[in-house]
Image (spheres, rainbow, N blue to C red):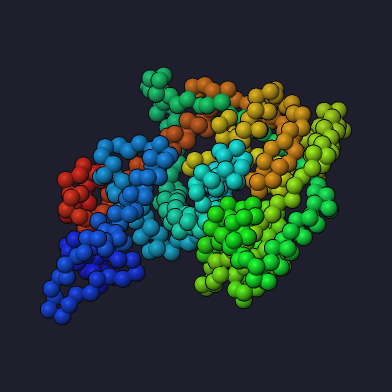
Amino acid sequence: MALLVGALMMLMQAGAAVRWGSLPNDSADNKTTPVNLASIIDEVVWVVGDEPILKSDIEAMRMQSEAEGIKWEGNPDCAIPEQLAVQKLFLHQAAIDSIEVTESEISRDIEDQINYWIQLADGSREKLEEYRKMTIPQMRLQMHDEFKNRDLIQKMKQQLVKDITVSPAEVRRYFQNLPEDSIPLVPTTVEVQIITRQPKVEVEEINRVKDQLREYTERVNKGETTFATMARLYSEDGSARQGGEIGFTPRSVLDPTFASVAFNLTDPNKISKIVESEFGFHIIQLIEKRGERINVRHILLKPKISQDALNKASAQLDSLANDIRAGKFTFDEAATYASDDKDTKSNHGLMANLTEDRTRTSKFRMQDLSTEVARTVETLQVGEVSKPFEMINSSGKKVCAIIKLKSRVDGHRATITEDFQVMRDVVLAKQREKVLNDWVASKLKNTYVRMNDRYKDCKFQYKGWVK
């Protein structure tokens, strides 16, 4: 650690020119080699413990904040690197305390985030890929390390505040003297149950798609064209723009069937058999394996659903909805046994919402629902079952659905009788925030910190960064 910290200090003192993959070497007479400014790729601006903070890290957080509309208190040039430095403190402590997160936890959180983005993109994977200018697999790969660190930080914070509790008396005391405009607003929230029916694709359509993929394979094998060219021309996945290339990706973030075939490929000159995933049918070509990650090209074709199939699925749901209304069985029972929605059927069709703080709840604000579901919810009374409608599911497939509005709570100022949990959470969050702030302040006293001189005049939230 001492050698690493020393090297990072030398980088900062020498102007902090950094080339990826290596550190500058000192010459035998300890003279500093002049830095070619044109070759500077990045700059170490802070060191916290043995962890560097790069200028690119700060710029990436700034761009993300701007994209998400996040406003920083004070000067962002000071607040952003301090926030990154605080994260380093929690990560460092997580390593000391042997806090771990599993690949399945990371993958689950990544999928939840991607599905949330798909909802915002009107349920369209293609629109999301177009907006973010990368494929879904590329998003998964890009997000992996960030989400791993996010999960480690979250677990570390939970460990630090696990014993913090608040009593009903403390909640009442906190709110009793607050002016009304300081009492939290509770937005309109709804709970929604859903049943979906996946229209069946005709055998003729599946055969057409498979024959098309076999033709692509034959043309590539004959040398008439390349796999990448065919992917650009015909693939229905966002990776088509990159010739079907998905980038180095771990098995855990790929569709299991796709991953099983891809990781068994050994010859880059051969094309896989046809693979069916939840997204459609693929053929795959190996580019390179690196340990537990793989880079492949693929061509995805999605079988077209006929209007007759949609009409049939809609009629089935219409009949099911009529039976529910007639009391032959409950929506809960129908969702468990008749729904094709794998994410909700085991929970009686109750939809789960991933909130901004990455917790799961059954309560949705209207803007958190997909366009089709929100539009239908607006027409329903509590307990009412909708007519069938079409929507795009999380796999980008068109499905038919019916929903039941389980509950609706209109927006209002929180009251101790109706919203005790909301008010309790406000008080609990403040107490936890105080504990975490005190921990950071204490941790700073015993942590090595060095920063570029241009940050030393900043007004930071925490004292102790400048030593």
Drawn side of residue 4 relative to residue 237, left or right? left
Drawn side of residue 145 relative to residue 37, left or right? right
Number of marks: 0
Up the image or down, 237 lies above or below 401; here it is below
Quarter occupied by the N terminus:
bottom left
**Quarter of the view holding residue 362:** top right
In percent of the image, x 59 and y 56: which residue is there? 232
Q: Position of residue 164 (x, y in %)?
A: 43, 44
In percent of the image, x 66 and y 48: which residue is there? 395
Q: Between residue 49 and residue 171, name the one nearer to us.
A: 49
Quarter occupied by the C terminus:
bottom left
In percent of the image, x 40 and y 36: which residue is there? 69
In percent of the image, x 56 and y 60: which residue is there? 243
**Quarter of the view holding residue 269:** bottom right
Residue 256 appears in the figure: no
Residue 401 appears in the figure: yes
